[in-house]
Image (cartoon, grey):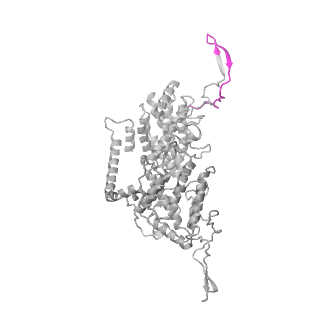
């Protein structure tokens, strides 16, 4: 029965894939009808008659890479799309979950219970009206019972050994297992004493002694090292019934069915925050930033923030860093643009500092002291500014942001932004502090004394702030600009994405002329010339930050991890291995980059076409003699 290892592996991996996808769809607040469509589309293909007949025929196990390709195609039979990095992490979660379930089975035959648990949970995910999909799941139940229902204990033992051999060199840390102390930091599982007995096993504590003729003589009692309990009842190894054990159920859902957070290679958030704040608000760095000087070029600022991010244990690929910087710039542009009066820039800054201070644990005394120092620095520099100085400061900042138009989902959702990336400034109904409510005209005499007041009805009803904001270090800022706009009122994260592609807009209702606005991504900025004076400034800051590598600044003891911040990031795992270029290196290379930008773009286009052609040739070659296992299943997808 060794040729039937693939079906049980495939069905269990498919179940785990659906668990992860439904958890992510729920976490991202995707509409229920769309979530159900994704599940049904995948199940219709995964459990289709032709596909299952190919999977269940006697054959050797596929290579892991081929299995990953099959599941990638399965995911993309739905309306959902995953990028390469997300697919890698999804497959890691699937394989580690199934490895855990096989490893922790009390006896080999429990593999059948694990498989049925997956099928039971999948059947519950499918709406009752999807009769055809439910029929496909029912057919898989019967197929599993037909193949594995009559297996002996020895055959199940051999099946389990082959599956464990398939998983033996896979060690990926998963937050759910780390949280429950089932896994070490090296990704290996911790197998402790099993206190729940397998079905048909007596409770330890007695030794039966028999005579030479095989008849029972007496029983000797002893005290076992651990107290073990029997299963409440015999599990149902058939198509229907209570499986009793929980292995194979959705481990990403709580007992009440709500989604649990899950990630691969999870590290504490506060450790990342404190590492970044310690560098960003360090005394030497802040003294260099706060001295009088011109604004840096945007590409220089991006490089500085990339180095700041990498002072922590976290690593971002180039695409994630570009999108992060776009989000940062668009958020600050929005806050500056929507200030009721120039002095409110101070409130926006204090709101950022107040929120950062709350992210730092109380025991991090040194980090809190650095934030306190920044409060005092801001108050010292900007506390005594006049209204005119704040107006000039605001104008310079808006000039810095004026040609940046990136669409952000949060702003689009709240109808604060057009499809061209420009902000919509409507009538402001909340008055700035110190401003009277519109509705009266004061008339004065020639000598300057008040004569009378004439009332009128304003076009909009405006309201005053509830109280005067605190422009000092402490107090209530009143306004919300500068607070975390990616969190709801209850502190939960809101979905956010960035789209910096130019797009035509149907903006008749907004009174905006239809235009195609070219946008420049952060990575493209590096091709532009770097200002010489700004280059020198960047070199100074580079020396303060140091040339950061995976273990730099932490004594080599911390392990870094790669993070994909956004749903459309492409894989770029090696992008952070090399040290970041200095400004002088960028300046030296900028002229050649400008002259060859068009040629590079053409090469990228041609390369992408060649890649797609090569991919089609690889997947569609069903007649070659060197065809590897799993290619025939990929061809089934291509023909579908």
Asked whether residue 500 is in view, the answer is: no
The residue range painted magenta reads 209-237
Please count the marks in the image: 0
Residue 30 or residue 601, whichever sits in front: 601
Using the image, determine if residue 634 lies above or below residue 608.
Answer: above
* Residue farthest along the top direction in this orientation: 213
Taking the magenta stretch, the answer to whether it contains residue 419 is no
Residue 392 or residue 358, whichever sits in front: 392
Using the image, determine if residue 479 lies above or below residue 134.
Answer: below
Residue 454 or residue 265, whichever sits in front: 265
Query: In the picture, residue 200 is in which quadrant?
Result: top right
Residue 590, horizontal then vertical, whole percent: 36, 58
Q: Residue at x 50, y 67 (%)?
A: 424
Taking the magenta stretch, the answer to whether it contains residue 226 is yes
Query: What main secondary structure does the magenta stretch of the protein show?
Result: loop
Asked whether residue 400 is in view, the answer is: yes
> Quadrant location of the C terminus?
top left
Q: Is residue 639 left or right of residue 467?
A: left
Residue 362, horizontal then vertical, whole percent: 63, 51
Residue 359, horizontal then vertical, whole percent: 59, 53
Q: Residue at x 36, y 42 (%)?
A: 619
Residue 98 or residue 509, whichever sits in front: 98
Residue 193, horizontal then vertical, whole percent: 61, 30
């Amino acid at each position: 029965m060794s040729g039937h290892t693939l079906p049980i592996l495939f069905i269990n991996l498919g179940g785990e894939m659906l668990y992860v996808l439904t958890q992510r769809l729920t976490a991202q607040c995707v509409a229920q009808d769309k979530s159900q469509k994704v599940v049904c589309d995948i199940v219709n293909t995964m459990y289709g008659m032709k596909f299952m007949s190919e999977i269940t025929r006697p054959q050797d196990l596929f290579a892991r890479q081929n299995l990953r390709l099959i599941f990638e195609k399965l995911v993309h039979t739905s309306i959902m799309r995953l990028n390469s990095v997300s697919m890698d992490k999804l497959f890691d979660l699937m394989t580690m979950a199934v490895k855990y379930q096989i490893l922790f089975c009390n006896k080999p035959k429990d593999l059948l219970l694990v498989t049925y648990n997956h099928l039971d949970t999948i059947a519950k995910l499918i709406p009752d009206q999807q009769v055809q999909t439910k029929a496909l799941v029912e057919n898989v139940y019967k197929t599993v019972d037909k193949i594995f229902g009559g297996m002996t204990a020895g055959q199940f033992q051999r099946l389990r050994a082959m599956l464990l051999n398939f998983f033996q060199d896979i060690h990926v840390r998963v937050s759910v297992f780390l949280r429950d102390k089932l896994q070490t930091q090296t990704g290996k599982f911790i197998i402790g004493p099993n206190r729940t007995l397998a079905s048909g096993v007596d409770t330890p504590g007695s030794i039966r002694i028999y005579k030479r003729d095989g008849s029972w003589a007496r029983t000797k009692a002893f005290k076992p090292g651990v107290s073990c309990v029997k299963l409440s009842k015999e599990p149902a190894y058939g198509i229907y019934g209570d499986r009793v054990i929980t292995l194979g159920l959705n481990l990403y859902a709580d007992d009440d069915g709500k989604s649990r957070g899950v990630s691969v290679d999870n590290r504490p958030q506060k450790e990342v925050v404190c590492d970044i704040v310690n560098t960003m608000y360090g005394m030497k760095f802040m003294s260099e930033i706060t001295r009088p000087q011109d604004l840096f070029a945007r590409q220089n600022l991006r490089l500085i923030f990339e180095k700041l991010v990498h002072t922590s244990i976290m690593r971002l690929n180039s695409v994630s860093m570009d999108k992060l910087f776009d989000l940062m710039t668009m958020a600050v542009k929005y806050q500056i643009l929507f200030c009721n009066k120039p002095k409110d820039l101070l409130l926006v800054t204090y709101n950022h500092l107040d929120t950062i201070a709350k992210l730092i644990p109380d025991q991090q005394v040194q980090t809190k002291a650095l934030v306190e120092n920044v409060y005092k620095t801001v108050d010292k520099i900007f506390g005594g500014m006049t209204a005119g100085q704040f107006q000039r400061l605001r104008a310079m900042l808006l000039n810095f942001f004026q040609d940046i138009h990136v669409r952000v989902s949060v702003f689009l959702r709240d109808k604060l932004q057009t499809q061209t990336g420009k902000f919509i400034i409507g009538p402001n109904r909340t008055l700035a502090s110190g401003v009277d409510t519109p509705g009266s005209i004061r008339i004065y005499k020639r000598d300057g004394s008040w004569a009378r007041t004439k009332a009128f009805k304003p076009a909009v009803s405006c309201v005053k702030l509830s109280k005067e904001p605190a422009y000092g270090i402490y107090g209530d800022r009143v306004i919300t600009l500068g607070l975390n706009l990616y969190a709801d009122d209850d502190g939960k994260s809101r979905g956010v994405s960035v789209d910096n592609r130019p797009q035509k807009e149907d903006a008749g209702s907004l009174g905006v002329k239809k235009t195609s606005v070219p946008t420049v991504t952060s990575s493209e900025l590096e091709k532009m010339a770097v200002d010489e004076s700004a280059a020198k400034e960047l070199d100074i800051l580079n020396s303060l930050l140091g040339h950061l590598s995976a273990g730099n600044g932490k004594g080599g003891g911390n392990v870094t991890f790669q993070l994909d911040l956004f749903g459309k990031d492409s894989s770029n795992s090696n992008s952070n291995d090399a040290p970041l270029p200095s400004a002088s290196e960028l300046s030296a290379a900028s002229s050649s980059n400008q002259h060859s930008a068009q040629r590079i773009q053409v090469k990228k286009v041609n390369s992408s076409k060649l890649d797609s052609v090569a991919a089609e040739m690889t997947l569609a070659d069903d007649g070659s003699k060197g065809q590897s296992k799993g290619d025939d299943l990929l061809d089934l997808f291509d023909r579908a």
